[in-house]
Image (cartoon, rainbow, N blue to C red):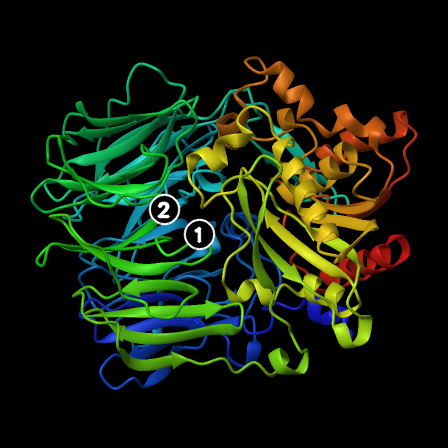
Amino acid sequence: MSIPIEEIAKFPPPGMSTPVMFAFSPDDSLLTYLYGENQSPVRRLYALDTETGEPRIIQASVEPESQELSLEEQLLRQRQRQLGQGIVRYAWAANRDLILIPAQSGLYVKDGADSPARLVISNDEGPVQNSTLSPDGSMIAFVRDAEVYVVSMEGGAPTQITFGARGTGKTHGLAEYIAQEEMHRLMGLWWSKDSRHIAFEEADETHIPVYRIMHQGKDATGPSAQEDHGYPFAGMDNARVRLGVVPVEGGEPVWMDLGDNPDIYLARVNWLPDGSLCAQVQNREQTKLDLLRFDASTGQAKTLLTESTDIWINLNDMFRPLDDGGFIWAAERTGFNHLYLYDSEGNLLRQLTSGDWQVDSVAGVDQKSRVIYFTGSKDGPTERHLYRVSIEGGEIDRLTPEPGTHIVALDHHFGKFVDVFSDTRTPPTITLRSLDDGSTLHPIHAPDDPRVAALALSPPELVSIESRDGETLHGALYRPPAEEFGPGPYPTVIYVYGGPSAQMVNDHWSMTCSMRVQSLRSRGYLVFALDNRGSRGRGLAFEGAIRRNMGDIEVRDQVDGVRWLVAQGLADPDRVGVYGWSYGGYMTLMCLCRAPDVFKMGVAGAPVTHWDGYDTHYTERYMGTPDSNPDGYRVSSVMSHVENLRGSLLIVHGLIDENVHFRHTARLINSLIKARKPYDLHLYPDERHMPRSLEDRVYMEERISDFFERNL
């Protein structure tokens, strides 16, 4: 049965309409989450009684769903890869029965789960950004027009507490683009534990040339039809950042001492239990990371520890301060990410986990029982489980029984946890479990999407292959129905991402509900996904194989995947195509240009084409700067290999993509024209890096499907 094009474009995909954003109330009596019933993308706020297991809707909406998001909201949702609608964010106060719901029209507060939402701050005077509750629940801090404000939870006029940024090109309280997109730090302001002070980032982009994006598809002209971005291109200037602390009553900020070199990255900020402030500061080369502790009253800094490497440092969110002044730390100093215990002066006490596997997250630290809960890949790189280990060290216990992928959220008292489980054969099943032994307390969500059965989705086979130089690579194999298309060999499509910081091949339902893959499979194509070297999840050496030379070993590994398929009698070597988006778009182009004898056609979505046109933090981590690595940039550019292109090529790009600018595709087109290489092009005037409009997505999938039919 061929899968309809409309099903490829729908959001959420089959089986993925599940509760998201789990949080426990301060007393752990309620578990809250967002959910759109009946496969709807429009989410409402639910609460589940953790004793009885009974769920109920506590907020259906706070406003009519706007058809036109503000520019600030559009960009935030792009950074979060957020396609949901309705209520998309909320937060509990740390120490009060109160919920904050940011919305298009302003900030709403619920005084308890069952109280009506009330408007505290309206957006009529300008968009509110970065809203966050004080720990005691008495105030909200937010940013409006580049400055930080606080407002009482009871409402009233907000108080501006930072000054000097508005109208200057600087911002107070906002994370700059690089921090949001590449460092995964969305916030630029942080409440102290006692709710008396706010730490905030000052970002100065006045020296960065403006990169203008025109809205060519809009009827309007003038300022409303353009966007100006301070985009830091590789090798060029970054935003200059400072870290200040200001009392909630206002006053002169105290600036923290970040060192003498202004060309650094402010990676993470945390308040400590004793009232001091910590920041993780990364050098421009991303080979060194300092953990600094500041006296918030003077700004004086002390270096608690320094990480250094010859490859690069991957940032994480696993720093956990302890009440005794010590802290939990995670680092890849052994080549794999593991946990370490330090005392208050930055002295290493012990390593807590070890082995050729990765710790992915710290789920919680029970200081009373001296137990750390974490997720990781101890049982294999394609699985994720919840584990625990004593702060004293020792054996590691696994708490999630089923093989596959487990995503968890722990309660505050370390008695219960939410387990979102899936594998390639099971859509996400969500359960409230005991943290003591992993036993089931209450079901939360069971797979109920009729599309799963109606579309006859077939899970992939997870396989391991060996590269030409002996490296084990993990892949996912999607066979077409044998009863309809025989035993093979088949026309074959390689589905690729291939870039660092991402892992495609997992024992997770998202592998099965990848609808473009399923559509191709249903029409007789063999589809194969392979995590080449450079992908995350296998340690720093595996990921670091691409250092200073992107688009080389990744292509070789993908070619080895094709050769393996041919040797199995599965792939027709004369009918092999490739497609991917973003880094996968780059990989598609590099496969076509660097292995033209293997790949006969490709679809490249929003591709990077030359790394000097991408941003600093991502690009320089892997490539250095254009000045320090000119040969690497040249060889890693698609344009250096266009002369070799022989296969059919379709390029897809959104014209207002503020992440991978359309300029990448325009520069490639110039090279294709000069080399007299034919190509097809599909543009989406109103789309960014992730197409959001259902109409655009349907049309795009029609064109991609047709291109495969005509060329493979």
Near mark 2 (Cα within 10 A), the count class, few <14, some 14-19 or many ≥20, is many
Cα separation, mark 2 vs mark 1, equals 8 Å
Amino acid type shown at disc 2: Gln
Q: In the rendered image, which quarter contains the N terminus?
A: bottom right
Q: In the rendered image, which quarter contains the C terminus?
A: bottom right
The answer to whether mark 2 and mark 1 are in CB contact below 8 A is: yes
Q: Is residue 8 above or below residue 484?
A: above
Please tell me which of labels 2 and 1 falls first in the chain: 2
The residue that appears at 37% across and 39% down in the rendered structure is 147
Q: In front: 44, or 68?
A: 44
Near mark 1 (Cα within 10 A), the count class, few <14, some 14-19 or many ≥20, is many
Q: Secondary structure at mark 1?
A: loop
Amino acid type shown at disc 1: Pro
Q: Position of residue 515 (x, y in %)?
A: 67, 65
In this rendering, position of residue 667 left or right of residue 338:
right
In this rendering, position of residue 182 left or right of residue 292:
right
Quarter-of-image position of residue 667: top right
Give the label on residue 358, or none.
Answer: 2
Give the label on residue 381, or none.
Answer: 1
The residue that appears at 58% across and 42% down in the rendered structure is 532
Is residue 174 visible from the viewing direction of this image? yes
Q: Position of residue 677 (x, y in %)?
A: 90, 33
The residue that appears at 71% across and 51% down in the rendered structure is 494
The residue that appears at 67% across and 55% down in the rendered structure is 528
Q: Position of residue 26 (x, y in %)?
A: 20, 66
